[in-house]
Amino acid sequence: MPDHLPIFDDVFLRANVRVKEGFGELVVNTFRGRLSSRQLT
């Protein structure tokens, strides 16, 4: 691409990685919450 900006070259790759990390954190936090609520009851 003649008019590309280096900072945006891998923006979709970085966004994809961040979405996967965020989803993983959500799953882990949900699992931890379920475990701690089971220990309280």
Image: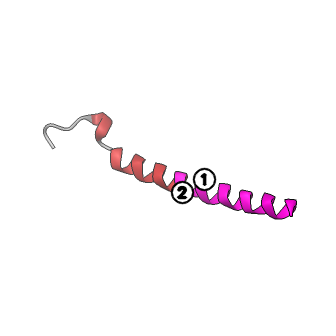
Q: Quadrant of residue 5?
A: top left
In space, the residues marked 2 and 1 are separated at their CA atoms by 5 Å
Task: Please tell me how many numbered marks the rendered image carries.
Answer: 2
Give me the residue at 86% from left, 59% from top.
40
Name the amino acid type tagged 2. Phe
Query: Is the N terminus in the top left, top right, bottom left or bottom right quadrant?
Result: top left
Give me the residue at 86% from left, 64% from top.
41
**Residue range of the region highlighted in magenta in the rendering:** 22-41
Q: Position of residue 2 (x, y in %)?
A: 13, 39
- Residue 25 image label: 1
Q: Residue furthest front?
A: 41
Classed neighbour count for the residue bearing mark 2: other residues with Cα under 10 Å, few (<14), some (14–19), many (≥20): few
Q: Position of residue 16 (x, y in %)?
A: 42, 53
Q: Quadrant of residue 9?
A: top left
Magenta highlight: main SS:
helix
In contact (CB < 8 Å): disc 2 and disc 1: yes
- Residue 35 image label: none
Which residue does the numbered mark 2 point to in the structure image?
A: 23
Secondary structure of the residue carrying numbered label 2: helix
